[in-house]
Image (cartoon, grey):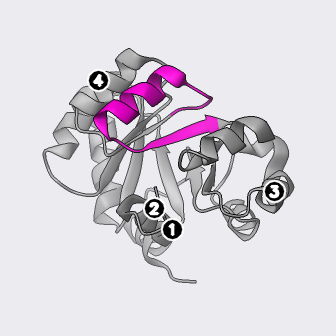
Amino acid sequence: MEATDPLLTALAAQRLLPVLRSPSAEAAVDRTRQFLDAGCQAVELTTSTPGWDGALATLTAEGRGFLGVGTLSTAEQAERAVAAGASFLVTPFPAPRVREVAAASGVPLIEGGYTPGEIAEAAGRGPAKVFPAHVGGPKFLSSLRAILPDAVLIPTGGISVEDAPAYLKAGAWAVGIGSGLPDDPAALTRLFTATD
């Protein structure tokens, strides 16, 4: 994927990638619609949500935004995500079987890694998820940026909305946020439509 890719353009514009771990498929659908209504262009559902593939199919039928699936670790999960209409796939760590499904289907993959070697390998193929990012913090991301200046890095895991600017300053393309995003529609709109 290149910087001109529509998904990467959307992520760069909104800066924060919501990562949803919802208690039910219905809750995932409702929360995703809130994000999209607020101006968010990309949302990541996760396989930890019961009925996640049904939620994704419902949302993709509405034709709004880039809707991905994260916490993928098996080919079967990746195939279900593709069948439900995923715009992108996300793994928490190197996942060759998911990579194979992504390549065969043409669906973009954001592959996870933690060590510099894992991240460099993932970044050589496309966007790389730095996970769990809170362990190393923004300084770790800065160090990665120094040796991978052209990489698209998306730190995720244990990052609050308040901490996100430090990761962006350290060179993140966007920051994955799993909790702490506001429920208030006006506050959400400010997050996803603000310009720097």
Task: Identify which amino acid the numbered label 4 is placed on.
Answer: Arg
Q: Are discs 2 and 1 less than 8 Å apart at CB?
A: yes
Which secondary structure, mark 2? helix
Q: CA distance from mark 1 to mark 4?
A: 27 Å
Task: Identify which amino acid the numbered label 2 is placed on.
Answer: Leu
Residue farthest along the bottom direction in this orientation? 196
Closer to the chain start, of discs 2 and 4, is 2
Residue linked to disc 2: 8
Q: CA distance from mark 1 to mark 3?
A: 21 Å
Residue linked to disc 4: 80
Closer to the chain start, of discs 1 and 4, is 1
Residue linked to disc 3: 147
Give x and y (percent) for residue 28: 33, 38
Give x and y (percent) for residue 142: 82, 60
At 62% from the left edge and 29% from the top edge, which residue is drawn?
A: 93
183 up-or-down from 165: above or below: above
